[in-house]
Image: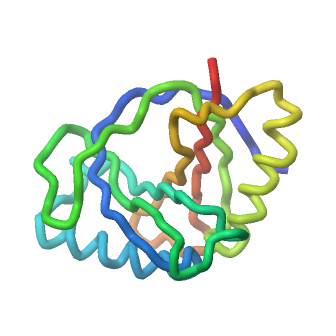
């Protein structure tokens, strides 16, 4: 139903900002992230991609308690602006699902990956690393939300 590939991602520096609130309103968190980065004059080419790490199951966690770390993958290590912390993307194998179509149908893609693709693939989830979303074309001017490409990256063993 969705294209999935297993690939190895290298360790990469990140800057992350904690955010708490309904995942359905996460765009507010990304607006705050943009404000922090702009105030600190952190832009491309240092910023390579925008990422989101979501820590709670929205089916069981009350919306006001849903936690995420929103941030950017960096081309090099740099000091974190106020409100952000430095981190590293943990290297290893990831199952990467390519989703086109913005946020409205994203949960369906997550469910398909976990409920259908992973069980049928022979891959096993690596719980020592966190899954994340990578907003592949979010730095491109003029990309409309319904045309956005979002990569769901789930760590797998191996």
| Between 37 and 79, the one nearer to me in the picture | 79
Residue extending furthest toward the top: 158
Answer above or below: position of 100 versus 49.
below
Colour style of the rendered protein structure: rainbow
| Between 115 and 5, the one nearer to me in the picture | 115
Q: Quadrant of residue 33?
A: bottom left
Answer above or below: position of 41 versus 152.
below
- Residue 71 position, x and y percent, is 35, 58
Answer above or below: position of 62 versus 58.
below
Residue at image position (30%, 77%) is: 32
Q: How many marks?
A: 0
Judge left or right: residue 104 versus residue 15: right
**Quadrant (top left, top right, bottom left, bottom right) of the C terminus:** top right
- Residue 7 position, x and y percent, is 59, 27
Judge left or right: residue 58 versus residue 29: right
Residue at image position (77%, 47%) is: 114
Residue at image position (62%, 41%) is: 154
Answer above or below: position of 15 versus 7.
below
- Residue 156 position, x and y percent, is 64, 30
- Residue 130 position, x and y percent, is 52, 43
Judge left or right: residue 107 versus residue 119: left
Residue at image position (39%, 61%) is: 70
Q: Quadrant of residue 157?
A: top right
């Amino acid at each position: 139903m969705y294209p999935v590939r297993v690939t190895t991602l290298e360790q990469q520096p990140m800057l992350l900002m904690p955010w708490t609130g309904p995942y359905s309103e996460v765009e507010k968190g990304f607006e705050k992230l943009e404000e922090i980065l702009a105030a600190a004059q952190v832009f491309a080419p240092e910023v390579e991609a925008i990422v989101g790490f979501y820590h709670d199951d929205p089916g069981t966690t009350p919306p006001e308690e849903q936690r995420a770390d929103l941030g950017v993958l960096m081309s090099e290590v740099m000091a974190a602006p106020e409100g952000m912390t430095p981190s590293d993307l943990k290297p290893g194998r990831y199952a990467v699902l390519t989703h086109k179509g913005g946020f409205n149908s994203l949960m369906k893609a997550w469910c398909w990956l976990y409920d259908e693709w992973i069980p049928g693939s022979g891959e096993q989830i690596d719980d020592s690393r966190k899954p994340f979303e990578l907003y592949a074309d979010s730095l491109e001017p003029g990309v409309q939300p319904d045309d956005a490409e979002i990569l769901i990256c789930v760590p797998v063993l191996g």
